[in-house]
Image (cartoon, coloured by chain):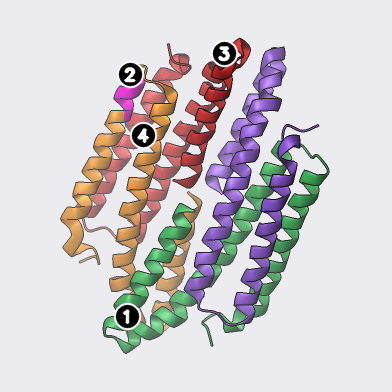
Chain colours: A purple, B green, C orange, D red
């Protein structure tokens, strides 16, 4: 089971809310809403996605990476490199 | 009509794709997918949201802000300040 | 004169402070400071750079882009496209 | 010794280059350079800072966090939380 097993329902709840927010963006565009209001909503959705990603990352570090670290050997380094690359993509997206 | 009127269908298509991607994230969490793969998908959704926001912003600058600029007066400065604040939120989200 | 002429001294003061902060980072690394404290300082420097960029951008929109807009013609569209591309780089950096 | 001890000279070289880039920004403002060119340079400096931060973070995960993980107990969780918070600040700056 992935490291986020115990928090699965929280994550699903967040993602459903984010899905709802993206539908909300479609309604705003459909309803000819003012551009700035739509951009403000995009920033809110982006922040919600980042919060989801950061909590998933913390669980990954606490479970998958920690377990590989305790086991030692090359797998530990690979897990850390893999996590660092994912963090880099988050920082640059 | 908002500045993005002519590009409305493109925007709606992008947003529907982003909505689909957020449902995809839910399936990944439901299916116990590996954390790093989910994080990679979050970066893709965030980038898609940014592309949508940047194209909407360009239309806003080219229509709403440009029109206020041509009209002159305090409204022009307000529109520029408003756009700059929205850009700040995008940069920091 | 560039659009930021009147705010030049403010910009230079900000940039000198940022330069000082980067020297501060070097001292922290030299002094073997704790990684997390260094990372916290990097976030502060990044935010200071963004604030500088956003104020410069607002002046650019209010002067260079606004002037091209009033003059009309293809130059206006070019200035807006150019500004939008620069905003995209800021959002993604 | 901090986790980045072995890479100290690399880090210092990067930071000196970033310091030089911030002086370059001052010269651009002094010389009345075009706003967009300055904004492009700001994006380059921001990316250089992020690269430094990400490599420092990887070393922190591989040394400080890994050691705490091997030792086990509450310190391990604290280190992971601390690292996650620092990652959050980087993502949002």
Is the C-beta separation of discs 2 and 3 under 8 Å? no
Q: Residue at x 76, y 36 (%)?
A: A5
Residue D67 badge:
3
Q: What is the crowding at mark 1: few (fewer than 14 residues within 10 Å), some, or many (at least 20)?
A: many
Q: Secondary structure at mark 3?
A: helix
In this rendering, do the residues under marks 4 and 3 share a single chain? no
Q: Is residue A88 magenta?
A: no
Residue C41 badge:
4
Using the rendered view, name the quadrant where residue C90 is placed: bottom left
Label 3 marks a residue whose chain is: D
Earlier residue among tags 2 and 4? 2
CA gap, disc 1 and disc 2 = 49 Å
Q: Residue at x 42, y 32 (%)?
A: C39
Q: Secondary structure at mark 1?
A: helix
* Rendered position, B6 above or below D89: below
CA gap, disc 1 and disc 3 = 57 Å
Is the C-beta separation of discs 1 and 3 under 8 Å? no
On screen, residue B84 versus residue B48, left or right, reads left
Front in this rendered view, residue B84 or D50: B84
Residue A29 badge:
none
Instruction: Give coordinates of residue A16: x percent, y percent.
Output: 71, 57
On screen, residue D8 versus residue B24, left or right, reads left
Residue C30 badge:
2
CA gap, disc 2 and disc 4 = 15 Å
Q: What is the crowding at mark 3: few (fewer than 14 residues within 10 Å), some, or many (at least 20)?
A: some
In this rendering, do the residues under marks 1 and 2 share a single chain? no
Label 2 marks a residue whose chain is: C
The region drawn magenta spans C25-30
CA gap, disc 2 and disc 3 = 22 Å
Instruction: Give coordinates of residue D2: x percent, y percent.
Output: 44, 15
Please name which of the two marks, 1 or 3, marks the residue nearer to the observer: 3
Q: Residue at x 48, y 46 (%)?
A: D92
């Amino acid at each position: 089971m992935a490291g986020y097993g115990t928090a699965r329902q929280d994550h699903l709840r967040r993602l459903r809310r984010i899905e709802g927010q993206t539908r909300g963006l479609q309604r705003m565009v459909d309803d000819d809403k003012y551009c700035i209001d739509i951009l403000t909503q995009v920033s809110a959705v982006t922040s919600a996605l980042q919060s989801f990603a950061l909590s998933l990352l913390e669980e990954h570090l606490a479970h998958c990476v920690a377990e590989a670290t305790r086991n030692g050997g090359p797998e530990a380094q690979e897990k850390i490199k893999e996590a660092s690359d994912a963090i880099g993509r988050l920082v640059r997206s």
